[in-house]
Amino acid sequence: MGVSIEVRGLTKSFGSQKIWNDVTLTLPAGEISVMLGPSGTGKSVFLKTLVGLLKPDEGQIIIEGQDLVTLKEGDLYEVRKLFGVLFQDGALFGSMNLYDNVAFPLREHTRKSESDIRNIVLEKMDLVGLSGAEDKLPGEISGGMRKRAGLARALVLDPEILLIDEPDSGLDPVRTSYINQLFIDLNAQIDATFLIVTHDINSTRTVPDNIGLLYHKHLAMFGPREMLLSSEEPVVRQFLNAQTVGPIGMSEEKDADELAAESGKELPPLPPIPLQLGTSDGTPRRAEKPAGEWCRANGIVPPPGSFLSGNAGVPGVPQNVEAGRAALS
Amino acid sequence: MNLLTSPIKQAGALFALALDVLRALPKRPFQTKEFIQQCWFIASVTIVPTALVSIPFGAVIALQLGTLTRQLGAQSFTGAASVLAVVREASPIVTALLIAGAGGSAICADLGSRKIREEIDAMEVLGISPIQRLVVPRVLAAMLVSLLLNGLVSVVGVAGGYFFNVVIQGGTPGAYLASFTALAQLADLWTSEIKAVLFGMVAAIVASYKGLTAGGGPKGVGDAVNQAVVITFMLLFVINFVVSAIYFQVVPQKV
Ligand SMILES: Nc1ncnc2c1ncn2[C@@H]1O[C@H](COP(=O)(O)OP(=O)(O)OP(=O)(O)O)[C@@H](O)[C@H]1O
Ligand SMILES: [Mg+2]
């Protein structure tokens, strides 16, 4: 069963450059959360702060009753054993081949025999679609392959918390769909808490249980998927629907003139909320909630056409019209 | 303000790393494989340049001293003076130059590129201390190689001096060799080796510090290497002076 992470009043700056201010959220145990935000808003910094690689200026990160920020080095190394982390560029050890990279955590932290290790490594390599590439060095493979190898390494110790930085950058659309399916299936299998940083709107709309948006040095919103997808809040709305109309400009924020010029423009209606991606064998995940539950509970009328299919407005995601109808009736 | 505090902060962080290395030293399992690899690596990048630098260095000292002793009328002490000069100062300085310039820069570039590829972060997340895993073996390897290099430089330097004085300048071999022990003593060799070990340690710690704090992409690594070499040179020359000063205070000199 996954572990929840409670973040309170987290603030981080590098020198005089403030990255984000007063971020407060709880990543619910065993659920998949996605963190969004324009480039450079400190999403990667947020992930690194959550594992204690960077010290925040203020705030607390509570995991299993311990505050990660004030932990001593020795205890920090213990808590980190709960984590599997995929860094933005894979962060493979350049001097080892892929097999040794994936086997590394097992050799360091378990007393498994080489043949057990071999089984686990080959299984995880197969899971991320890298069978046959075991002998390659990280320098010899593509960025997308490095990313998948990094994911395999993050998975070998069956982590309670998985932090994943842009799994889909550098992956083709087909692989992205496979990776998304993999996250859902993994979550069903190991019940870990997932936090995924992504720029991919399709993935954001269909994969997570919760969505957060970092924008303009603070956390604009964090909550259940349906809450953000039905939100009228301009920033959230603009980002989740990838539009140019809204407060976000090419460089962070639009100035007053640009906003004034837009004021007359009609916002396109909110697109329908797609169904959440299910597990590949159809068994529900523990964290899975019925489609439309949050909207009903909070008296929100979802945009017309919501929960009818898994790809409402988004290509490349398997359709599931029957399940949608069933959920509505 | 920043101009004033940032060097102090850096010095503090460097010292903190040195303490961390000291604390990680007794931690098991000791990284024997990494240590041997690093010894081999540092030796392989330093041995040839060291030998090539120390031959002309020995020769130039012999040239200077040969002339000087003749001017002072103390030709019989040429050998003694050149041994002293080589063992006490020249050889630790040559060792310092190479261990910082070749060994330190290689360590810094290696760790720096791992840092910007996030390998160091990944290692920490996997619950492994990069200090114990990467820095300690490098510091120990640099110390050992430095010790051996210093021996090598001393031998090559003295041999170079002998060759130059006896074969080129036509000095008497017997007098040159006989005067070896006239001024020099065993403590000179010890001091020289102590200096070398200190140099190796400082060079590796500075290089590791700069490498582990590298940032800002490949250019950041280049900058880090550059700074590491400059800082190490400055530190090594200061240490060299301090150790020499202590030596003259503590060890009675032959007269
Ligand atoms: N170690 C560091 N030292 C100083 N500044 C840093 C450091 N790491 C990140 N930054 C700065 O923090 C800001 C946020 O960086 P971060 O990598 O977290 O962005 P991001 O949201 O992940 O962007 P992207 O979507 O492009 O990956 C950037 O302006 C960056 O320059
Ligand atoms: Mg990033």
Image (cartoon, rainbow, N blue to C red):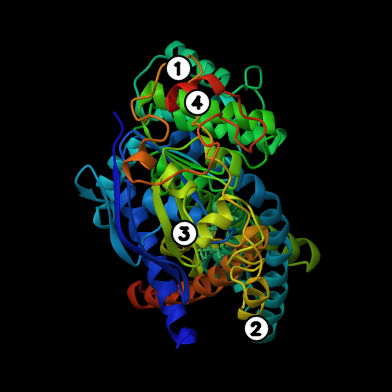
The quadrant the C terminus of chain A occupies is top left
Q: Which residue is mark 2?
A: B73
Name the outermost residue toward the bottom.
B1
Distance, label 4 to label 1, CA atoms, is 42 Å
- Whether labels 4 and 1 share one chain: yes
Q: Which mark is residue B205?
A: 3
Helix, strand or loop under label 2: loop
Give the residue drawn at x 49%, y 85%: B3
Give amino acid for label 3.
Ile
- Whether labels 4 and 2 share one chain: no
Observer-nearest residue: B114 or B235?
Answer: B114
The quadrant the N terminus of chain A occupies is top left
User: What's the chain of the residue with tag 3?
Assistant: B
Residue A27 at x, y = what percent?
A: 34, 44
Q: Which residue is mark 4?
A: A324
Name the outermost residue toward the left.
A65
User: What's the chain of the residue with tag 1?
Assistant: A
User: What's the chain of the residue with tag 4?
Assistant: A
Observer-nearest residue: B184 or B193?
Answer: B193
Q: Which residue is mark 1?
A: A117
- Choose top left, top right, bottom left or bottom right for residue A198: top right
Give amino acid for label 1.
Ile
